[in-house]
Amino acid sequence: MKYNQINSELFIQNRERFKKQLKANSIAIFNSNDEHPWNGDALHSFKQNSDLFYLSGIDQEETILVLFPDCVIEEFRECLFVKRTDEKMITWNGYKVNQKHATEISGIKNVYWTDEFEVKMRPMINYAQNIYLTLNENDRSVVSSHYKDLRFANEMRNKYPLHNFERAAPILHRLRSIKSVHELELMKAAISISEKMFNRVLKFVKPGAWENEIEAEVIHEFLKNKANGHSFGPIVASGKNACILHYVDNNCQCKEGDLLLLDTGADYANYASDMTRTIPINGKFSARQKQVYNAVLNVMREAKKLLKPGVMLMEYQKQVGLIMEKELIDLGLINTNDIKNQNADWPAYKKYFMHGTSHFLGIDVHDVGMRYEPIKAGMTFSCEPGIYINEEGIGIRLENEILITETACIDLMEHIPIEVEHIEDLMQK
């Protein structure tokens, strides 16, 4: 890991909150993610299972966490299994977390080797009535691979067909959506890295620069500040490319008079930042670009006011749509006839603002949460309106991270330049 070791109190508290939600005489088992093959004998960079990390802090492959609060044998009420390491392993692959270090990271006293799991846990599982397992139930996920959690769930059902199986995901989705003080500090650290990155990019961007060169500036600042890397594939989109919502080719040259849409995030300690800024490549917005930009900024400011406890996300999105509708009329992009004749399932404003305004944030950039339940204090969301005018070659999106409090919300990125005049001033210095 590149980041500084996290206070184990975070993971101790997370486990305690989770265990309180379990039925009596239940065991919960969590696995690390697979290592995914690239080509030949190469592997993709490892990314830990978010639930396992949330509950243990262990950022390594071949890890298993077991929680069994009612276990008759005390040492198995909370235990961890990590990859067996020795001198040969270290020579070939470098340092791996040993048992002592795993305890320091997680706060779990009882740590064993992963190859001992079957022998040690089979008797314990037989004592349990309920087995809690987790799958990727993120409602944005479209998974086709037979991933570790899915394979393990099938194996457990075959081995223990008379046990009662329970889903851990609903519990974890609710818990993970409410951020603790420790988590907010990690998220703020990731945001700080994004701020440094943006200030670096403002000094670098100019006509003739290539999108991939800008992407290189982004990852340079991330790695320099101990981030693991990107929290998602970076969008570095100049000109008309900014009208492609998930543009990731990042291979075009920036042209005089165009805008650059930069949507990036740092992965720090497995917590994601997510920020979007749109800047003039030559350092000066045209009159039209400024007009559209300020319309997006106005929508963002009004949308933030709507994010508060008790609000339903679907209703919030409808309200943001009405705010955007007015801005698009003022820009001459739609008119009252368009609204009068619109399809209720695809309002007129969707021609220029076709995506959602907010998503959960946390360990994952599109984090888990209960989308159809009211917003609660402690949740964190993006706020990211945009206007995309393909015929004018203008794509503008602005995005900040928002923390919900008991009464309203706090913009965690409010200090990062976003005003037209501020951006122009910084680019021209």
Image (spheres, grey):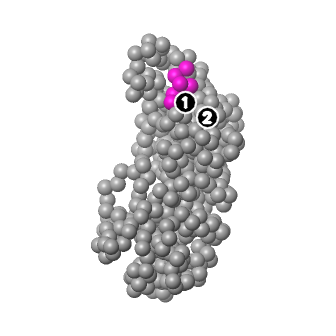
Q: Given the current orientation, which residue lies at the most extreme top position? A: 337
Which label belongs to residue 320?
1
The answer to whether residue 255 is above or below residue 327 is below
Q: Which residue is mark 2?
A: 306
Extreme residue toward the left, this view: 158
Question: Could you tell me which residue is drawn at 69 percent across and 34 percent down?
Answer: 422
Mark nearer the N terminus (2 vs 1) = 2
Find the magenta span and give its range: 318-326
**Residue at x 51% of width, y 59% of height:** 172
* Dominant secondary structure (helix, strand or loop) of the stretch shown in magenta: helix
Is 363 colored magenta in this rendering? no
Position above or below: 121 against 145: below
Residue at the spot x=41%, y=58% of the render? Answer: 136
The image shows residue 164 at horizontal and vertical percentages of: 38, 68
Q: Quadrant of residue 247?
A: top left
**Residue 160 drawn at (x, y percent):** 33, 75
